[in-house]
Image (spheres, grey):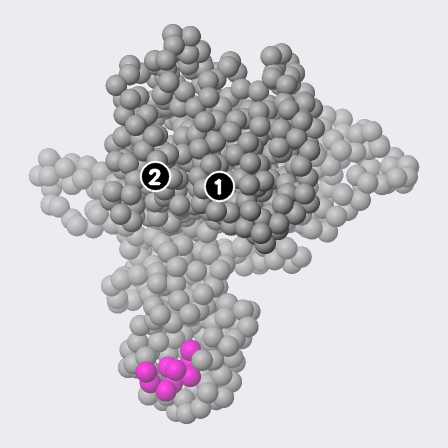
Amino acid sequence: MDGENSALAGLDREREKLPPIYTGSAPAGLGRGAKQPFPSLNTFISTLSQRRDAVGRGLVGGVTGTLSGTLGFRHGRELPPICSDVRQKHRFSIDTLPPEVKAPFPCDPVIPLRTKTTKEFQEDMERAVQSGDWREVREFYLTTFNSFIEINAAFKREANGSFNTIDDSGVNGKFVSAVYDALLGTPQDIQKSVLKGIINSLLREWKGPRTKDDLRAYFILVQNPQYSTTSTYVIYAHLLRQIAALSEADHHFLVHWLKKMSARRFRQLVERLLQFISTRLFPAEPDELPPLAKCSWWIPSATKVLSLFNAANSVSSPPIMPFTDFYNITLEHIDFMEEYRTWQNYGNSNRFSFCQFPFILSTAVKKAIIQKDSEQQMISQARQSLVSKVSRRQRVDMNLLFLNIKVRRAQLLSDSLDELTRKRCDLKKKLRVTFVGEAGLDMGGLTKEWFLLLVRQIFHTDYGMFSYMKDSRCHWFSSWKCDNYSEFQLVGTLMGLAVYNSIALDIHFPLYCYRKLLTPPTVPCDQNALVGMATATLDDLQQIMPELAHGLAELLSYEGNVEDDFYLTFQVFQEEMGVVKSYNLKPGGDKIPVTKQNRKEYVQLYVDFLLNKSIYKQFAAFYHGFHSVCASDALMLLRPEEVEMLVCGSPELDMSALQRAAQYEGFSKTDATVRCFWDVVLSFPLELQKKLLHFATGSDRVPVGGMADLNFKISKIDVSTDWLPISHTCFNQICLPPYRTRKELKHKLTIAISNAEGFGLE
């Protein structure tokens, strides 16, 4: 194996002596119009003949634009986050691909017939293991991996069938799995022969554009389990580079073939790519990999190929694996702000940045980028204010560095609205809250109390701004019309301030709300441009109004006479403040009956009306309020789910992590009461654990940074054990009397957290 690495390293050295013949635009998967030197492996033998040089140069134009369609990337500073709606907009249909992509390449070589089946191969393996005679197995592996033609001969279901479709790769996946599952159990010389064959395959002369059989070979080779060790990383890197340099149409096929893999195999390949990136960034031994300066293309290549898997995962319904499993936690230890600045400032140059592929960055990294970006804007504003004061020889007040909010408890909502409206230019400064007539310096507790009280008041059903949907257990915007929507802007501003000040809010919007919030991800320059008009589907309505969504789904599948049995028109009725009003879904809608032929249009217009048009002014004010605080290019890195996590925290609870991070006042972690407390809490079912967290912090969700960010404290109160535990939600604190028994503590704690509204701030 070392011999193959030495050979490839030697080829690398030879390549460095050659003039760059492959320095055109990088695949558009780099994002933001970036260009990246991306030499092809066949340039290693470019000096062998002038003809090969010409072929290599001819490939440059074919690589430009790779990934941009399939993955939803686009050029320019307005790069959107990779999300399903963007990707859907740019997805190909096989019917729209050019004929030369759909048709077999005219000079495809004839593939030799190989008829070994999965059962026959497994029988060969069993005989070899029992007898120790590996000759037949060795011959199979040696032949199969020696060229792309032989790979297709072994694994293609019909040797010379075209299979030019996204629906079927034509590969015998069961046979591929059997061959690879057995490979690591074969003698070392067989494993080395496979690697030698792969090297030969990758170094073979490129004969014009890639064919679908070449694409199948890449699809099969990337599944090889041998790439899990650093000794094979040089070969793996060259394979990834060639896959990343394929055409946009080829990537389209690969994405759809990848999504049909088994979940187990798919996850293995994703984890292997993530490990490859992590190891290249932080090798265990400095000399186990080539110097980073000489293989700077490794990480961009791997990240682009990983983005194909991310795209395949996103277009699968349901996704093959959670989007969070694409996070590379190692990237939390790099200078991600430098990555962000590179993305912002050098988007049209040859600088690679992980921000071009935001799916790989964890929510914690994205939150840190947003906060640091906002802090830099805040510091800039504060500096301007100080310079202005000094230049006018005015007294410098350090309050200029803060967003100071002064409110009366009795007039909390109106005072908050007035303060935020009047101090609109200071929203990016650090928040500091004062309750009029109350002594106390805001060290974080008053700020959190202000958020908690405002959220309780604004989202109370009697207030009327938001409707609580019992079936979906979420809030949605009321459609009532008024002259002033400033209170909706206040809610958006509150959400933005909560993100900036790392406070999780106890609000429950559906995921579709956050998708609207990122439509578009940055505020348009045109003041009249529409905002929040995300494409709405029946699945989105299901999140909010499941009963209505079910009724509309039944309408779509109804077999009878739709017009006579339902008697609907393109007109809908809506109750607003006790008054029923009618709205036409399209001009003259009240006179257009809903029929079997137009019912899909009716459902689409109805859903769009409910989720977009009927609440447009309310949501537009909400959108502008949020972006008045969080306006940043960094928002383009976020998925809707990640925005929800930034605003509300994560629903994933780990009470053991909370125990490790807990602080104590009056107790030590070895005291009997403390030990009983954690014994009880860890034995609680999830629902009671959530109630406990809500009781202590005001929210049943965890900050993006994890339990450690809660600053959770258990304090001792010297009172009779007849007292229930009490909480100070604005300080994330529970106060316990010294209970005598575990049973007594469990009983009292259960009563307290089950009636959390009666405690805490009150």
Q: Residues within 10 Å of mark 2 (few under 14, many from 20)?
A: few
What residue is drawn where x is 39% and y is 42%? 276
Residue in front for this viewpoint, 183 or 760: 183
Q: Quadrant of residue 422?
A: top left
Q: Residue at x 26, y 47 (%)?
A: 285
Whether residue 292 is in magenta: the answer is no
Tag shown at residue 150:
none
Q: Position of residue 412 (x, y in %)?
A: 41, 58
Q: Residues within 10 Å of mark 1 (few under 14, many from 20)?
A: many
Tag 2 residue: 2
Q: Which amino acid does the dot numbered 2 rest on?
A: Asp
Give the residue displayed 82% in from the left and 37% down from the top.
568
Query: Which range is magenta?
Result: 670-678
Would residue 132 appear left or right of 577 to someone viewing this image?
A: left
Q: Is residue 383 left or right of residue 750?
A: left
Residue 166 % position (x, y): 64, 29
Looking at the image, is 269 positioned above or below residue 163?
Answer: below
Of marks 1 and 2, the one in the foreground: 1
Task: Label 2: state its secondary structure.
Answer: helix
Residue at (40, 45) in percent of width and height? 229
Quadrant into which the C terminus falls: bottom left
In the picture, the disc for residue 190 is 1
- Asked if the magenta segment contains residue 676, the reply would be yes
Q: Secondary structure at mark 1?
A: helix
Which quadrant of the structure image shows residue 666?
bottom left
Query: Among all residues in the image, which is located at the extreme left?
Result: 393
| Mark closer to the chain start, 1 or 2 | 2
Please name the amino acid that badge 1 sits on: Ile
Q: CA distance from mark 1 to mark 2?
A: 15 Å
Task: Answer yes or no: is residue 639 visible.
Answer: no
Residue 231 lies, in percent from the top left, at: 36, 42
